[in-house]
Image (cartoon, rainbow, N blue to C red):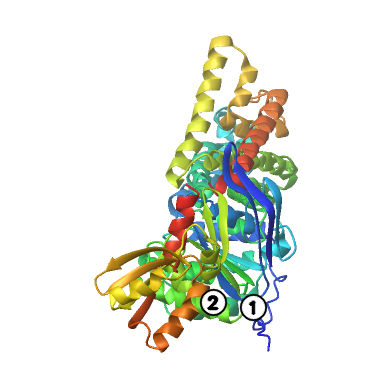
Amino acid sequence: MISLDRASLRYGPILGLSPTTFELPDGGGITGLLGPNGAGKSSLLQLLSGLLPPSGGEVRVFGEAPFRNATVLARLGLVPEGDRLPMGLRADRWLRMMGELSGLLGEALKSAVARALATVGMADRAHLTFARMSKGMRQRIRLAQALLHEPELLILDEPFNGLDPEARLTLIALLRDFAAKGTRILVSSHILGEIAQLTDRILLLFRGRLLAEGTVTEIRQLLDRHPVELRLTGAAQVLARWAVEQPELAALRMEEGAVVISVRSPRDILPRLQKAAAEGGIPLSALDPLDLNLDAVFQYLTKDHA
Amino acid sequence: MPIYAPTLPPAPDLHLGQPPALVIMRFDLTRLWRQKIGRFFGFAFLMMLLWKVARIYVDHLLQTNQAFKPMQEFAKTILTQGADFQADLLNPASYLLWFLVALIGGGLVARDTLYRVRPLMYAHPVAPKDYLLAKLGFASALPFAILLPFALLPWAMSLLLAGLHGPVWATAPLRLLPAMAVSSVLMGSVAVGASSMAATPRAGIGWVLGLVLGLGTLASMIHTLTGFRAVDGLNPVMLAEAWPQLLVGVDHPLVAWVPAILGTVLHIGLWTFVAARRTRPSEVVI
């Protein structure tokens, strides 16, 4: 569905995105585009949504270059960053114009607007002007705008910015629902928690470079320089004695009622740990991986490339 | 067993719509309609139009009613006649029309800049040239639509009352309509070009008025200092007034043919170029 082959983007002398290569397959699913501010997330989304041509390399969406390509643009929906909408305008009128720009007319347009509004739960409030809507309501209308023509690819640039927790949860549920129905969704964010709640598959950008691609577990396994930290809760002394005999151990520290071990290949040590616990060899009451989450992966990657 | 992605529902037919430029123009028109900005201007233009039509009727009375015979000569000295009269059908609306174009045209592109509408539009099957065409088309169609009754209503009245011998030439629309078209495109391109340089609608209005009045003042100063009349071709207000005069063949038009053509081409070309540059996708995403 999406493929980048050494695609880069320059804003004059500033490099917005270094030559980047990756592919996203066909079919539904959510991919999180993660990175701090200025990482190049918006640049990448602008390339994919056909707003800008790549300065180098090649961008392909649905097998074609998206820049000024009406065939591609008709199959994707974009929710750009920000909350600026013409405040005096009614949401339904705004949606009708956007629908017409997507090539809808008459009954098809009317039913598309009604369907999109119902999907985002705004059918009874679409007659309001944007000025009379909350931020969450406006974000739903922006999402409805992108859904009018039933896109196969939905691109959202920082969609959670400024939303309250309830609106975030609603939006996350909506996006999961679309993905389950077969829409490919690309969501950018600089907030790890949002992406972690939404998806496990990420593209991690930092300073205009694609640092990693895949699921959190896949990426974590590639970070050889950072052994995985496991907290073993139980009789700390016995657990520590067992741990120091393991060849994968890189580091160990004692905590109250627990021992935290750093191991290079958790896949090898975990079966032995399981076996020892099952046989009563070690008094293990809990096992917590401390840095197998997105937060840790992000920290390690950005620190390594800083 | 492999897991397949769910099949998407059939996509809607996306080839029913109108050209994007037309959709954007229609949207701007309905937005303008709802703003009710036209009440004051509608009243002012209506009064001017009534005066024009009344003038035709007065002329008819002077020609046909014996009681007004003694006033005929006096009327000729105070009322414009011949080619001047034909050109004058469009001119009184000039400054007011420029003000209206600034008020509406100034926000046309600037409003979209403020609300970041263009990235959204360009993410639809809308090319930058569609957008520019829509804005230029709307900003030019507005003065043209306002001037249309000024050209046609007195002409129809004159034909109705006095036939081919009325004060308005039977062929006047053939000269006035092209003049209106040129003046309207000039007004539209200046307004859109100026609006594209602004970040808010109010700033856009300021830009249009600043450009129009500033260029007028500059041209007037150079004219006064050097005595070089052709420099008036830089003044957009004078250019818009000069085209009806040139096309109906007034003896002493405000701007001569060559400076009028050069000035008009310069303004339309320059401001369209500015608007095209400022509404490029690379400008709108930053």
B240 lies above or below A187: above
Along the line of sight, the residue nearer the viewer: B20 or A142? A142
Quarter-of-image position of residue A62: bottom right
Query: How would you rate the neighbour count of disc 2 (Cα within 10 Å): few for under 14, some for 14-19, many for 20 or more?
Result: many
Q: Nearer the viewer, residue B100 or A142?
A: A142
> Which label was assigned to residue B221?
none
Q: Residue B246 lies in what quarter of the image?
A: top right
- Per the rendering, the mark at residue A108 is 1
Q: Would you say A3 lies left or right of A217 here?
A: right
- Estimate the x, y position of residue B64 in percent, counting from the top left: 63, 43
- Location of the N terminus of chain A (image quadrant): bottom right
Q: Measured from the top left, where is residue B7 in percent x and y?
A: 67, 83
Please report the residue visible at 53 percent of the width from the left and 55 percent of the height from the top. A205
Q: The disc numbered 2 marks a residue on which chain?
A: A
Disc assigned to residue A116: 2
Question: Which structural element holds mark 1?
Answer: helix
| Left or right: B128 in relation to B210 | right
Kind of residue indicated by mark 1: Ala
Pointers 2 and 1 within a single chain: yes
Image location (x, y in percent) of residue B191:
56, 41
Residue A87 position, x and y percent, is 41, 60
Is residue B190 visible from the viewing direction of this image? yes
The chain letter under disc 1 is A
Q: Nearer the viewer, residue B47 or A284?
A: A284
